Every structure is written in C-alpha cells, then in structure tokens.
Amino acid sequence: MSQLLKFREKANLTQQQLSEKSHISVRTIQRIEAGKALKGHTLEALAKALAIDKEALYETDPDIKVENFFWIKLINLSSLLLLIVPLGSILLPLILMYWKKQINPITKQLVSLQILWTLSFPVILFIVIFLGNLVPLSKQLVPLTMLLLLLVNMYIILRNTAALDKNKQLYIKLKFSII
C-alpha cells in the first residue's frame, strides 16, 4: 500500500477531495497510489494538503529506516564486483544483505535482479555465438556483446543507486522476487 493512500485514508479524504485540496489531478493521485514516484511540486502540494512532512510520503516501507538506505545502496553498489569476479554481483550483495540484516523488499529485488541478469548473460552470449556460426558475422561480435551486457548491468546498478538516493525507491525492478 502506498504511503499516499495511507495518509489519504487517515485524513478520511477521497481522491477527488484530495485533488481539489492539493490542486493535483485525480489521475496523478491514482498513479502515485499505484506506485509512481513522487517528486517536485506534486510532492510538496500533496504533503501540504495532507498537513504532513514530505519525507513521510517518501517512505517505501515502514520497516525500512532512513539510516538503512546507506547499507541498501552499498549492497546495490557491491554488485559492481561483477567486473572482477563473475558471480560477485550475486555473492557479495547476498553476504552483505545477511551480515547487516538488511533483508527487506528492496534488497531482495536488488539481488533478484542480479541473479536474473547473471543467468541471462550466458544465454544471450550463446545466442550471439550460435547466430555468429549461422551467419558470417564479425569476429568482434562476441566481445562487443559481452562489453555491452556489462555496460547495461553497470547502468542498472548505478541508475538504481541514484533512484535510491533521490526517492528511496528502485528505478529498475522486477515484478517478482527470486529470493
């Protein structure tokens, strides 16, 4: 359940009433309650209309404290170990997650994303190799594919770190969890 929905129901307001009070469209309120990230003017207008601190609307899970986001970001960034150790993008985040007792929906999503990515990597590579044998392609295609896949994974890791820093949510996530 979204934080906005919780506060709206606590204030005993309908979406239409909150819309009128905050001057934010009903559709925008519906999107936020469905999981869209809050930011800028919308965040301030809704917090003011509900007479709450805007930080309260940022919280993604009441069990996740703000000080834990340091460890959540570190767990995410530890996935960059994949550049040195192939399974490092899974092992180090898992070790940190259990060692620091940061077992929550966000860290589970981060590790699940890396597990899925690690399993997809060889599959995509084998497809490229197979296609390279069927159709005469450049001999540089396999190394370029590997580099591209590593860069995409680095982008995912860094983009999620930025999103965690900015609005305490993942930008790129799965709709399921492997863990």
Image (cartoon, grey):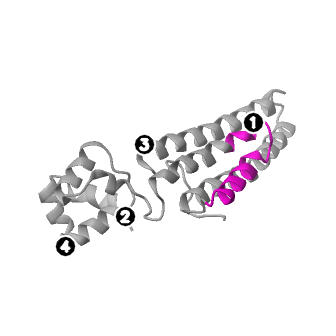
Q: Could you tell me the amino acid type at mark 4?
A: Asn
Q: Specify start and end residues of the magenta stretch as a single range.
A: 79-101
Where 145 sits versus 163, above or below? above
Please state which of the two labelled residues, at mark 3 or mark 1, is closer to the viewer: 3
Disc 2 versus disc 1: distance between alpha carbons?
36 Å
Tell me residue 171's x, y (percent).
49, 48
Circles 3 and 2, Cβ within 8 Å, touching? The answer is no
Where 101 sits versus 91, above or below? below
Q: Earlier in the sequence, mark 3 or mark 2?
A: 2
Tell me residue 20's x, y (percent).
12, 58
Q: Residue at x 64, y 37 (%)?
A: 154
Tell me residue 136's x, y (percent).
84, 31
Q: Earlier in the sequence, mark 4 or mark 2?
A: 2
For residue 75, side relative to residue 84 (left or right): left
Q: Residue at x 34, y 63 (%)?
A: 3
Placement of the N terminus among the 4 image quadrants:
bottom left
Q: Residues within 10 Å of mark 1 (few under 14, many from 20)?
A: few
Q: Which mark is residue 12?
A: 4
Disc 3 versus disc 1: distance between alpha carbons?
26 Å
Disc 4 versus disc 2: distance between alpha carbons?
15 Å
Q: Could you tell me the amino acid type at mark 1?
A: Leu
Q: Nearer the viewer, residue 15 or 50?
A: 50
Circle 4: element type: loop
Q: Earlier in the sequence, mark 3 or mark 4?
A: 4
Please state which of the two labelled residues, at mark 3 or mark 2, is closer to the viewer: 3
Q: Nearer the viewer, residue 145 or 91?
A: 91
Residue wearing tag 3: 166
Residue wearing tag 1: 83
Residue wearing tag 2: 2
Circle 1: element type: helix
Tell me residue 163's x, y (percent).
47, 44
